[in-house]
Amino acid sequence: MMKSLYHSFSLTSRHQILLRMYSPSARKIMSSSPIRKTQTTSFESLNDYDEQFPPLTGGSKKKKVSPTSETNFGCKHRDQGTRRSRASRSLDEEANVTTFEVAAGTGSRTSVVELDSTNPSSPSKSSQSHNLKIRKVRNHRNSGFKSRVQSPKRKEDPPFDICSSVIERNDTSINDWALADETNGETVEVSNKHRVLRPGMVLLKDFLTHDIQVDIVKTCRELGVKPAGFYQPGYRVGSKLHLQMMCLGRNWDPQTKYSKNTDIDSKAPDIPVAFSVLVEEAIREAHALIDRESGTEDAERILPVMSPDICIVNFYSESGRLGLHQDRDESQESIGKGLPIVSFSIGDSAEFLYGEKRDVEEAEGVILESGDVLIFGGECRMMFHGVKSIIPNSAPMSLLNESKLRTGRLNLTFRHF
Ligand SMILES: O=C(O)CCC(=O)C(=O)O
Ligand SMILES: [Fe+2]
């Protein structure tokens, strides 16, 4: 039926143990982020995803962003449902005519080679076996990209290629090379670098090993250069997001949200099973941390379990950013249960802001580095969050060399509809 060939994703036998990815080594020193000047913009004039922190050209107020900022006030999302929908409606109705620069990119089309979609996207029990293999298969039945109905925002441009054969970074660090591969520890303890940032919000530092990051980049690249791959989303009139985006599992765009999923031809590629396994592993790790810190076994109540059926993959160039917003287009049920968003960061570090309001001045910040996983669910599910800036030249050189990821940051946010 389908001819398969193995894809070298990390979950082959070579890398089974890497599912226990808790690198014992402090191979990276947390970046001390440069303090950026913040310029705020009245959000009355903004679309949902427009940045409230446009290019760093002025302003006077310094935003405190710590590598592992720890705060303990709650997110109180439970009572935000109605406030949220009111806010969303008014924002959605706004006509916005702000223009932004368009990220340049080259793209190429490749032959149709898909990740095996015969496995259910919810790997749950069987996926925990750590013996999963990701197969690339020729799947003509599922390869209907040609006739894919494109979003009105989607240009006819070729998809953006997140990789280049040229390494764009100009500084090399011997440490990157020396320490790149020391991630094979089978340690099962919860890393001391991980942090509970708020109840329901957990940062797993350095959770994705080097090899896994490389394979995620390669997999996203393969999917991303196909017609359903990366493009720069925006609104019908006006602004575009400062990033390239691709959807897995279910299509989403800032204007039509999840409504473009009715036509079989416009189906988004499946989430690779190995990605879902990593998500579930990350949530388990977060639970272990929450239990350890709270001294209870209450973690699943604070941070519910989630099996992803959507993954939004963003690529930010060095000038990329994303305004403060809530992830609120998933089902009422998913949001109501506080099913978490699980976010993987790969490549250059990001200054990530989060807070209870769509207010940059009040938001807290944390640096998300390559390999970090951020989870926010439970009472933090409706937290406002955004990417203030990408920190140039902060990606591990070994990652760039091996994956050929362009200068910039790859982010995958997993959700359950
Ligand atoms: O890039 C990030 O860290 C956040 C992305 C995000 O919030 C989103 O895609 O909704
Ligand atoms: Fe988001």
Image (cartoon, rainbow, N blue to C red):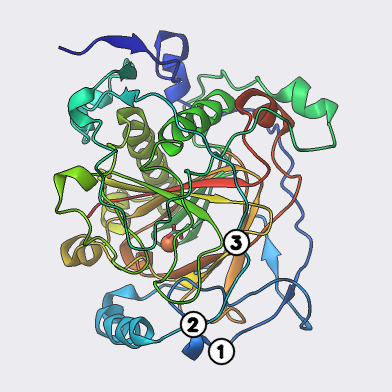
Q: Is residue 103 above or below residue 75?
A: above
Residue on which disc 3 sits: 102
Q: Is residue 118 visible?
A: no
In the shown orientation, is residue 175 left or right of residue 192? right
Q: Mark 1–mark 3 contact, CB under 8 Å?
A: no
Q: Earlier in the sequence, mark 1 or mark 3?
A: 1
Q: Residue at x 23, y 35 (%)?
A: 144
- Tell me where residue 325 sits by quadrant: bottom left
Badge 2 element: loop
Q: Amino acid at mark 1?
A: Ser
Badge 3 element: loop
Disc 3 vs disc 2: which is toward the camera?
3
Q: Amino acid at mark 3?
A: Val
Residue on which disc 1 sits: 42
Circle 1: is it few (<14), some (14-19), or many (20+) Cα within 10 Å?
A: few
Q: Ligand 2 falls in which quarter?
A: bottom left
- Tell me where residue 331 sits by quadrant: bottom left
Q: Amino acid at mark 2?
A: Leu
Q: Earlier in the sequence, mark 3 or mark 2?
A: 2
> How much space separates mark 3 and mark 2, taking CA atoms?
18 Å
- Which numbered circle lies on residue 150? none
Q: Mark 1–mark 2 contact, CB under 8 Å?
A: yes
Residue on which disc 2 sits: 46
